Image (spheres, grey):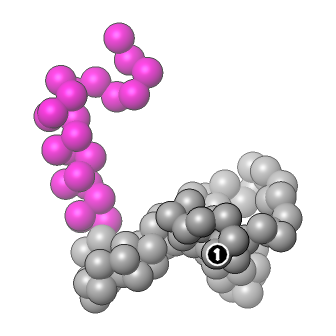
């Protein structure tokens, strides 16, 4: 995936995530086409998703943390969630 395609993918993900917090008439991503699942692009897709959540975080909080700092925040949130939920991930008994 080239840089332009990657950046477009990040923008699609962040738009869809942001739209989840908006009323239907305020949403931007109503015309975003389906993304084809391609095993060759999975690493890029997951990286784009992480970057999109980072952009959403910055947009909501106004925090200027960089991407690495954000991954630390995400790790702390997951660790806290696991502690509060007995160390079980979603779907485990």
Question: 55 and 43: which one is in front?
Answer: 55
- Is 11 above or below relative to 45? below
Say if 50 sits above or below 2 in the image: above
Q: Residue at x 21, y 28 (%)?
A: 85
Quadrant of the rendered structure where residue 32 is? Answer: bottom right
Residue located 50% across and 64% down the image: 21
Q: Depth check: 85 or 37 in front?
A: 85
Q: Main secondary structure of the magenta part?
A: helix
Asked if residue 90 shows in the view, the reply is yes
Residue 11 position within the rendered picture, expressed as x and y whole percent measured from the top left: 64, 78
Q: Is residue 85 left or right of residue 43?
A: left
Name the residue rendered at 39%, 28% in the picture: 90
**Disc 1: which residue:** 26
In the depicted view, which residue is nearer to us: 24 or 37?
24
Asked whether residue 88 is drawn in magenta, I would say yes
Residue interval drawn in magenta: 71-93
């Amino acid at each position: 995936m080239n840089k332009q395609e990657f950046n477009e993918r990040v923008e699609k993900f962040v738009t869809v995530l942001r739209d989840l917090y908006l009323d239907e008439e305020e949403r931007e991503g109503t015309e975003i086409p389906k993304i084809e699942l391609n095993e060759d692009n999975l690493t890029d897709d997951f990286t784009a998703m992480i970057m999109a959540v980072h952009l959403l975080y910055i947009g909501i909080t106004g925090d200027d943390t960089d991407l690495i700092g954000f991954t630390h925040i995400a790790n702390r949130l997951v660790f806290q969630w696991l502690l509060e939920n007995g160390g079980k991930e979603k779907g485990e008994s």
